[in-house]
Amino acid sequence: MELDKLNISLTGRKRRQPKLLTFAGDNRFLFVLALLWSVVTAYLVWKGGIKTAGLLAVLLVALPILYGIMAYPPFALVSLMVAAYFIMWVIRMSLVDFPLGTIMDSFEALILVTLFWHQRFRPDWSFMLQPVSFLVLGWFVFCLLLVANPDAASQLAWLYSFRTMAMAMLMYFAFVYFINSVKLIRLIVVTWLSLSVFAALYAMKQEYAGFAQFEINSISDPLNTILLYIDGHWRKFSIFGDPVAFSYNMVVSSIICVSLIPAVKTKWLKVLLGLIALLYLRVMLFSGTRGAYVLVPAALGFFFLLNFKTKLIPFAIMAVVVLIVMIRIPTTNPTLYRFQTAFRPTEDASFNVRTNNQQRIKPFILSHPFGGGLGAAGASGARFAPNSYLAGFPPDSGYVRLAVETGWLGLLIYCSMVLAALITGIINFFSIRNRELRAYCLGMLIAVFILNIGNYPQEAIIQFPTNILFYVAIALIVASKRIDKQEQNAVLKPVSAGNS
């Protein structure tokens, strides 16, 4: 180390004081401001007591976070994903009486404000020219106009459902605008997989060490017990709202890992991704969700179809053989037996009940092109319009809920949006040249694909964090192609300049 870089006086001269202690210029102003803040804080705590102290502490934390969201969009996007993962866990803990869903809505609204704020300095609405962007906006506008649905039983039910749906939809535009580099996509994907690893490990804790006391309190209700305690085994939900959200998240995260393996060059990272994918699939079985079991072969089949190569055929055959053995092998294990029944739905009493319910509600869907109103079916319908026709109807399916609440016209718009996302993803996957971006596009494409398959037997895209991650995946499909195109243009420009 060089001596002239040390903050030590070797010549006996008086060492210069740091500028902060000279009380000159801007530093004097900061000192006075800090002094005033200390005096005001002490006075407010003296007058208001412990509640005021807590409020000031929250304000002290909230202001830097607010600044980070407005000034650094990557921080905002990652923070939203973290919040979406943990909100249901915190709600289950019952730590606060304040509705945390409102905080999430405010967080998402702030990100939208940030989007418009940054458009002032970097105006770019080119992403709106994408067909999928147009259809996401169309789906949002259609749901907004349903407030005037003459067949809606309750405006409060519409507001209750639209609030969460709309904010999740609009996050697509924030992500697709702010994602402008491979580095940021990498950060988002790593964050996604890391949060899923935490959820997987916590599910293992629930399986082998038992539920925490606050979780026992939340599932002690008889209705929850009926849903979660099956064949002498508690279905696990990890940090999510229910086993469905947990299991679907594990399947999606595992297929993202599988999609990244071919693009990774280092062997240890390939092995790590493979082990993480197996971890996700292992803990997924703890959920006891039949719909999630079917998603695994569907995802792998779509993966092999998009990556059709002769050298992959043996692996595909091996996967099919393993699947057939797992379905056919005799077993007394309740988890494996539940897995097997997922591929024999006609033997499942609950599946037959759902089929009968769908047949019963079909005339209503055909006669109501705009549906019975957002939030009209299920628990929200029973809460806000208990005497309505749909209040006692259990949708038990994302698509059935859409058809019942938004009508066959709403279902058509939604399916068009999903189809546009899938077609865009397939086109982008085969046209992207950057190997890493291509892998990200593939992972998100399969994520959108299997979430919509899973949306038929269950309501797959209704809870945190899946409602956010679904639109994040669509945004990454669009952004990956745009970034790849920018990279190709940057390569071609010097070549063109040299030729001229």
Image (tube, helix red, strand yellow):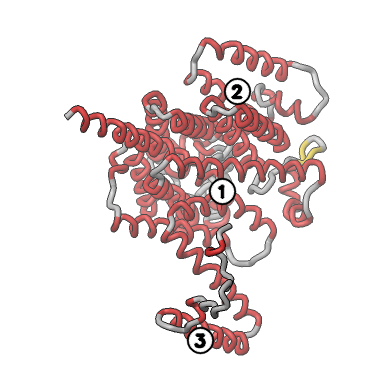
Q: Earlier in the sequence, mark 1 or mark 3?
A: 3
Residue beneath disc 2? 297
x, y (%) of residue 184? 46, 44
Query: Up-down: is 440 above or below 15?
Result: above
* Mark 1 in CB contact with mark 3 (< 8 angstroms): no
Image quarter of residue 47: bottom right
What amino acid does circle 3 point to? Leu
Q: Residue at x 59, y 74 (%)?
A: 57
As drawn, the label of residue 391 is: none
Dot 3: element:
helix
x, y (%) of residue 245? 61, 42
Q: Nearer the viewer, residue 407 or 170?
A: 170
Q: Is residue 367 visible?
A: no
Q: Earlier in the sequence, mark 1 or mark 2?
A: 2
Q: Is residue 200 visible?
A: yes
Residue beneath disc 3? 36
Label 1 to label 2: alpha-carbon separation: 25 Å
Q: Residue at x 74, y 51 (%)?
A: 219
Residue beneath disc 1? 464
Q: Nearer the viewer, residue 417 or 189?
A: 189
What amino acid does circle 2 point to? Pro
What amino acid does circle 1 point to? Phe
Dot 1: element:
loop
